[in-house]
Amino acid sequence: MKQLKVGVIGVSERGRTLASLFAEQDNVILSAICDSNPEHLELTKKTLEEKGFREIQYFEKAEELLQTDVDAVCIATYGVYHVPLVVESMEAGKHVLSEIPAINSLQEAKMLKAITQKHPNLKYMAAENCCYWAFVQAWKTMYENGKFGQIVYAESEYLHAKDFREFKKDDYPEDHWRRYNPAIKYITHNLGPLLYIMEDKCVSVTCLESDLVYNPYKRGSQTGVALIKTKKGAMIRILICFGAYVGFDHNFRLLGTKGTIETDMVKSLYDAHSWARFSDIPGSIDDKVDIPVSVKFPGESNISGHGGADSKMIAAFVKCILEDTKSPIDVDFAIQMSLPGILAHESAEKGGITIEIPDIN
């Protein structure tokens, strides 16, 4: 069996989770870890050794890891460092799985496109794990089978916070990107799955952001609503809200010419089924049909990592390298699902004007 040597750059909580999931893949040898924080390295080493993974090199500098013989790297640092590290990694001849956000600006989109064009034999994949939720996969199959007809409208909401009585100034370091990043820019967990299902791309966006805040210790706008027009003529609404009295929730809905579907907003994400109305099912125009798929398919084991999406995403990344196939979430898709959020914030800052979304190609 072919095996891939992998290194992970950035092992705070998220990177540590991904490192463990890589190590558990049968066709992966996790051989190198890097983080500039010695405490992160020590905790990761302890975690991996407890799971039996001891033959791993540890570094404090990315350039040291990139000098090793790893075939691929997973970049899971603070979001502002992703694109520079993608460039450095691909220049070193490594395949790359880059965490979200894939880009932080139009300039970074151009940088990302340029480096992947320069190294066409290397795989780049954005780590948009939500595309691997079971209900997203099921909805895509339904769309391909014509169950919805033409999708006219789609929407998704991402709400993520904790009890407001637990907000603290030291939740994040002063310079941490999550402290100042506008919520609407973190759009890919919601826009990504919709574009993946709809096989569409965004052409323009308008957005408004609330002037009010939930968390007094964060500087960026905490609530934004973007309205997006797609190439096929559909409309997409995205709400991103970080701070409301909600632990963690994602809601999705599609309205088509032949059918509609939505996630159950009553139950928690990991237990929520989908509810549909299909024109080929008599009576469903009044009584919704229960689609018993959540983030996992019925019977799937209770695997870790966002309902198993992380493991599926990693497996897809490894497979595209070993089998030399197209990256499932390649640079073009990474940019297409990221740029609308960046320009949405710009729209909000300019009073909600409509902004055309450029084609980086």
Image (cartoon, helix red, strand yellow):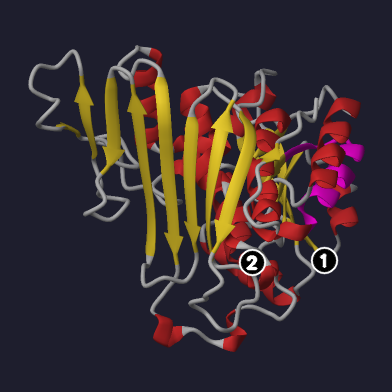
Residue pictured at 91% horizontal, 28% vertical: 118
Residue pictured at 63% horizontal, 78% vertical: 172
Q: Secondary structure at mark 1?
A: loop
**Residue that label 1 marks:** 60
Residue pictured at 24% horizontal, 46% vertical: 264
Q: Secondary structure at mark 2?
A: loop
Dot 2: few (<14), some (14–19), or many (≥20) neighbours within 10 Å?
A: some
Q: Nearer the viewer, residue 172 or 207?
A: 207
The answer to whether residue 93 is magenta is yes
Task: Give the residues in magenta.
Answer: 81-96
Q: Amino acid at mark 1?
A: Glu
Question: Which quadrant of the view contains residue 139?
Answer: top left
Q: Amino acid at mark 2?
A: Ser
Q: Nearer the viewer, mark 1 or mark 2?
A: 2
Q: Position of residue 5 (x, y in %)?
A: 72, 39
Say if 43 sits above or below 138 in the image: below
Say if 57 sits above or below 4 in the image: below
**Residue that label 2 marks:** 12
Q: Are marks 1 and 2 in contact (CB under 8 Å)?
A: no
State the quadrant of the N terminus: top right
Say if 81 sits above or below 311 in the image: below
Q: Position of residue 163 (x, y in %)?
A: 38, 79
Q: Nearer the viewer, residue 225 or 133?
A: 225
Between the C-alphas of marks 1 and 2, the distance is 13 Å
Q: Would residue 60 appear left or right of 330 to someone viewing this image? A: right
Say if 182 sits above or below 302 in the image: below
Q: Position of residue 154 (x, y in %)?
A: 42, 35
Instruction: Residue 188: give its label.
Output: none
Dot 1: few (<14), some (14–19), or many (≥20) neighbours within 10 Å?
A: some
Residue pictured at 39% horizontal, 61% vertical: 248
Q: Would residue 265 appear left or right of 156 to someone viewing this image? A: left
The answer to whether residue 295 is magenta is no
